[in-house]
Image (cartoon, helix red, strand yellow):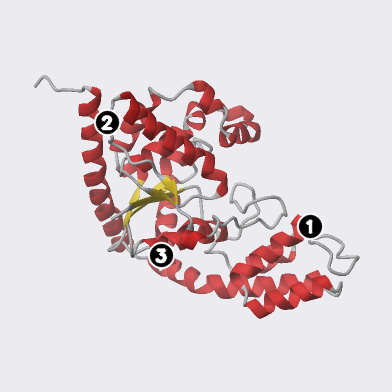
């Protein structure tokens, strides 16, 4: 059975981009693959080195994973920092990761521009930690968004490099998982500029209140409207239609698409419909999140069981790696 690994940072709520990117796919894969899904609290420190309330953030994301449909009986769901084997493998992989290749990654260059006062070593070696997360469970597939494709390719590089340097076949070479042969989903933000993301301030979280969703969507960036029949939609408008395509009924999308084509569209109507459709989609998830968040006993049980299962897998891999490199005890 193929192994799949996926994770998300613990810096805040899951949003629609997370759900339609990795989480929705993963819910399907847990029925057909050996699946590991983790909350990346180590990763969060690369951009938030002094987190306000790391524990609460982790608890929130764990509740959201479960509310979305990740089944701890079918998947191994765990917290990254509960697995000490991960940072040890990260250390070992860093010995064969080179400055030039790390500095060239798009994610590093982008974050370095965004946070020039905090260009830390963890940010530079983010792809190495990501590789450790993946290959410590000998993953065959990783559901990633387009923004992480380069980092996944580096994980493949590190796996190949280890196998080649030590003349072994320890690590499978992980591949991007494309759900049902479709391209990896990229959910746009409400500001009209690229993907949805919490740090970009353009996201709608799965736990967001209806009032907040309406306010955000009604303020979404638009333009002055089409001026010619069958005009091609600019990116800022295509983004709204992309959101609508994942939360609205096909006939609703068709209605507004036709209205745009014949220049009769009213963005106020489109935004109102989009907001209500998002609310309709997120309400059952939000209700479940609230229920699970109050059940501390259940959350503790899930985290403990997940850590035990993840450590069983990780410790086997790390022991194999240590033996291959040549670490031996003298006692």
Q: Which residue is nearer to you in this view: 80 or 129?
A: 129
Q: Residues within 10 Å of mark 1 (few under 14, many from 20)?
A: few
Rendered image: mark on residue 28: 3
Position above or below: 251 against 96: below
Relative to 242, 147 lies left or right: left
Residue that mark 1 sits on: 234
Task: Specify which label sits upstream in the sequence, 3 or 1.
Answer: 3
Looking at the rendering, in which quadrant would you find the N terminus? bottom left
The answer to whether residue 55 is seen in the rendering is: no
244 lies above or below 307? below
- State the image coordinates of residue 20 (x, y, percent, origin top left): 53, 61
Q: How many marks?
A: 3
According to the image, label 2 marks what residue?
168
Q: What's the distance in space between the residues labelled 2 and 1, CA to CA?
A: 50 Å
Few, some or many C-alpha atoms within 10 Å of disc 3 (few <14, some 14-19, many ≥20)?
A: few
* 189 and 184: which is toward the camera: 184
Identify the residue at horizontal 63%, vertical 29% (top origin). 116
């Amino acid at each position: 059975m193929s192994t799949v690994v996926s994770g998300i940072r613990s810096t805040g709520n899951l949003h629609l981009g997370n759900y339609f990117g990795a989480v929705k796919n993963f819910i399907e894969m847990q029925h057909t693959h050996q699946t590991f899904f983790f909350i990346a609290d180590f990763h969060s420190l690369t951009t938030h080195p002094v987190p306000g309330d790391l524990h609460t953030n982790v608890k929130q994301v764990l509740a959201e994973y479960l509310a979305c449909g990740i089944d701890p009986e079918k998947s191994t769901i765990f917290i990254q920092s509960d697995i000490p084997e991960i940072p040890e493998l990260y250390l070992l992989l860093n010995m064969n990761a080179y400055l030039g290749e790390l500095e060239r990654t798009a994610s590093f260059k982008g974050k370095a521009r965004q946070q020039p006062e905090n260009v830390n070593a963890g940010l530079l070696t983010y792809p190495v930690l990501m590789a450790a997360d993946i290959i410590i469970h000998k993953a065959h597939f990783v559901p990633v968004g387009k923004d992480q494709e380069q980092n996944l390719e580096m994980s493949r590089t590190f796996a190949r490099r280890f196998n080649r340097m030590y003349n072994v076949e320890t690590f499978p070479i992980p591949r991007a998982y494309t759900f049902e042969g479709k391209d990896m989903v990229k959910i746009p933000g409400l500001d009209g500029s690229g993907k949805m993301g919490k740090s970009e301030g353009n996201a709608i979280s799965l736990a967001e209140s209806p009032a907040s969703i309406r306010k955000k969507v009604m303020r979404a960036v638009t333009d002055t409207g089409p001026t010619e029949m069958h005009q091609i939609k600019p990116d800022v408008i295509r983004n709204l239609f992309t959101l609508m395509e994942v939360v609205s009924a096909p006939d609703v999308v068709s209605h507004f698409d036709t209205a745009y084509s014949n220049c009769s569209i009213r963005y106020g109507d489109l935004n109102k419909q989009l907001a209500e459709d998002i609310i309709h989609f997120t309400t059952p998830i939000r209700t479940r999140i609230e229920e699970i968040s109050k059940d501390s006993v259940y959350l503790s049980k899930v985290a403990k069981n997940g850590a035990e299962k993840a450590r069983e897998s990780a410790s086997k891999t790390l022991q194999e790696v240590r033996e291959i490199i040549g670490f031996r005890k003298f006692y």
